[in-house]
Structure formats: C-alpha cells, structure tokens
Image: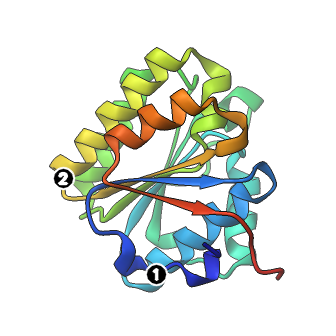
Amino acid sequence: MDIEEFSVSELDGDVFLVLVDYNDFRDVADCITKKLLDNGLEGIFFNADRDFPTLKKDLEYREVDVDRLFFIDVVSKMRQMDEELVRTEFIDSPTAYNDINLAFSNFYQKEDIDFVLLDSFTSYLLYGNLKSIGNFVNKMAEKAKKFGAKFIIIAMEPQLEEEVVEKLESICDNSFDFDNLVDE
C-alpha cells in the first residue's frame, strides 16, 4: 500500500501495526500523524527515534499542526536538549517505564486523546530487550484502549525477525504494510 492511499477510516479497531522499510519510516510516521490531525483528531507522538527539535522541524515541514500534539520524548534528554514545551514530556531514559507511563497518564487527564503514535518500535528496541519493551508497549496499547485512543506502532519490517512481527501482529487489530512512498 502507498502512504498516499492510506485513510483514517481504515483504522477500524484500537491497536495497529504499520510496517515500513527503514528508509521510509519517518515519512510514514509523519504522514500518518498529519492525516490524523487533519481529520480533527488530537494525539500523542511517542518519539523513540528523533530528538524533539528534529521531530518538530520534520512535522512543521509537512505543515502538521504540532500545537495539537503532545509529545513523549525519550531521546532528547539523553542528548541534553532543553525542556521547552508544556505539551512535551522529556523522559531521562527510554527504559524509564514508570516515567513514560506517568507522562501518558498526565496527557490523558489533560485532553481527550484520540491516538498515540509510537514512531519506531524497531528503534526503541535499541534501548532494551524485546521482552521488556514488548511488554511495555503492550501495556501502553492497553492503556490507550482504556482511554478510547487508537495506538499505532510503526516498525521497520526488514530489521525485525518474522517471529517479532508475528508477536506484534498478535496484539494488533490490523496491520498495514507501506512498501513505497510518493516522492515529495
């Protein structure tokens, strides 16, 4: 499927796996976020790959209304980035699961959150083992469902073993495979 063909109406269910090629995962995450926001939804962008300034710049380049997003950033603090926004939680470590959980809870209490997007499950695996991160992502997906939000997991398919993809698909209601992008 091409990302331009993707429609928010295809998100029938609560938890989704989006499989992409390594070269496309940032573009796919940004495009999906834009489509969700353009449909009037509010969300949380859980970035595990890019520091916040880079992510914000990438989203603004796509004309994404970043003021309608909350961010949970597990990368920038590690690189001594300044904490600059109220709508952003900078977490000291990608494996500080209690802090991340608390950040999610705080955002859910502030606003009606319609979606959570994890920009790279595959990148997140760099910070810990599959079992602990997989369990944590599953718990966060369950939490999103509890609050009525859709949970979208972006994963770089070629970098994951087939067994890992199958485990991810087992917790998801649907999966999408974006095999190519329209050049911008």
Q: Is residue 167 above or below residue 109?
A: above
Between 145 and 92, the one lying in front of the other is: 145
Q: Earlier in the sequence, mark 1 or mark 2?
A: 1
- Please give the name of the residue rendered at 36% of the width and 61% of the height, measured from the top-left corner: 115
- Tag 2's secondary structure? loop
Residue bearing the label numbered 1? 7
Pick the front one: 23 or 67: 23
Q: Is residue 9 left or right of residue 13?
A: right
> Is residue 39 something one can see in this rendering?
yes
**In the figure, residue 36 lies in which quadrant?**
bottom left
Q: Secondary structure at mark 1?
A: loop
Q: CA distance from mark 1 to mark 2?
A: 22 Å
- Residue 144 relative to residue 160: left or right: left
Residue 87 appearing in the image: no
Position above or below: 116 against 60: above
Q: Which residue is mark 2?
A: 147
- Tell me, yes or no, whether the two marked residues, 1 and 2, touch with CB atoms within 8 Å: no
Q: Nearer the viewer, mark 1 or mark 2?
A: 1
In the displayed structure, would residue 71 be above or below residue 74?
below
- Other residues around mark 2 within 10 Å, as few (<14) / some (14–19) / many (≥20): some
Residue at image point 74% right, 66% down: 58
Q: Quadrant of the N terminus?
A: bottom right
Q: Identify which amino acid the numbered label 2 is placed on.
A: Phe
Q: Quadrant of the C terminus?
A: bottom right
Percent coordinates x, y for residue 40 in the rendering: 37, 83
Which percent across, then down, holds residue 165? Answer: 52, 37
Label count reads 2
Who is closer to the viewer here, 55 or 181? 181
Q: Position of residue 37 (x, y in %)?
A: 46, 77
Q: Tell me if residue 59 comes above or below residue 9 in the rendering.
A: above
The residue under the point 52% across, 78% down is 6
